[in-house]
Amino acid sequence: MKFLGGPRLLQGLIVLVVFIGALPAFSSELTGDPQAGRSLVASRQKGLCLLCHSGPFPEEPFQGNIAPNLSDLVANLSATQLRARIMNPAITNPQTIMPSYYQPEHLTRVSKPYQGQSILSLKEIDDVVAYLMTLKKE
C-alpha cells in the first residue's frame, strides 16, 4: 500500500502523535511572563540556555555557539512547538544534546538529588516560551 504524501509526511504524523501523547495538556494561549522567561533564559544557575545558545543579551559576554541563536530558532516555530522542544527536545531530534527541561522519568546520568525532578516547572516553561515569542521578527 502506497501512503499518499510519502514517508516524510508519515514521519511528521508520527511525531505529532508522539507530541500529543507525551506532553501535558495545556492551553495554546500564551500565559507566561516574558520578563521572568528572559531571566530564566539568561540564568547561569537555572535555565542555562546561554551555555549552548546565543541571543539578544548584551549584558552576557559569554554565550554559546553550538546551538542556534535564539532569535533565529524561534523564527519559524509556534508557541506550542517551542514549548514541546523545551519540554523534551528528543521528540523532534533523538540525537540532541539539549536537556529535557520537563521530563523527570526515563533519563540517564542524573545525579541522585535530581532524580525524578524536572529542570523547570510548567509555569517556568510557559515564561520562557512567552519570552522567546517576543524575539520573533514581525
Image (cartoon, rainbow, N blue to C red):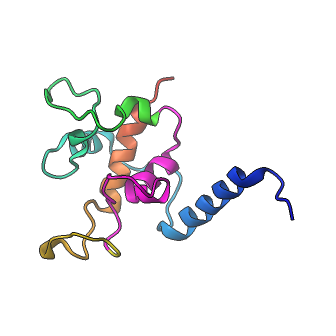
By secondary structure, the bulk of the magenta-drawn segment is best described as: loop
Picture coordinates of residue 61 (x, y %)? 13, 26
Q: Which of 95/50 is in front?
A: 95
**Residue 138 shown left or right of residue 52 in the figure:** right
Residue placed at 45% from the left, 29% from the top?
136
Tell me the quarter of the image containing the N terminus: bottom right
The stretch of residues the image draws in magenta is 75-104
Q: How many marks?
A: 0
**Vertical arrangement, residue 58 with respect to residue 99, above or below:** above
Locate residue 94: give its quadrant: bottom left
Residue placed at 51% from the left, 50% from the top?
80
Locate residue 60: give its quadrant: top left
In this view, the residue farthest toward the right is 1
Locate residue 89: give its quadrant: bottom left
Picture coordinates of residue 108 (x, y %)? 27, 71
**Vertical arrangement, residue 136 with respect to residue 98, above or below:** above
Residue placed at 18% from the left, 52% from the top?
46
In the image, is residue 86 part of the stretch drawn in magenta?
yes
**Residue 117 shown left or right of residue 76 in the figure:** left
In the image, is residue 90 part of the stretch drawn in magenta?
yes
Picture coordinates of residue 126 (x, y %)? 38, 52
**Residue 92 shown left or right of residue 44 in the figure:** right
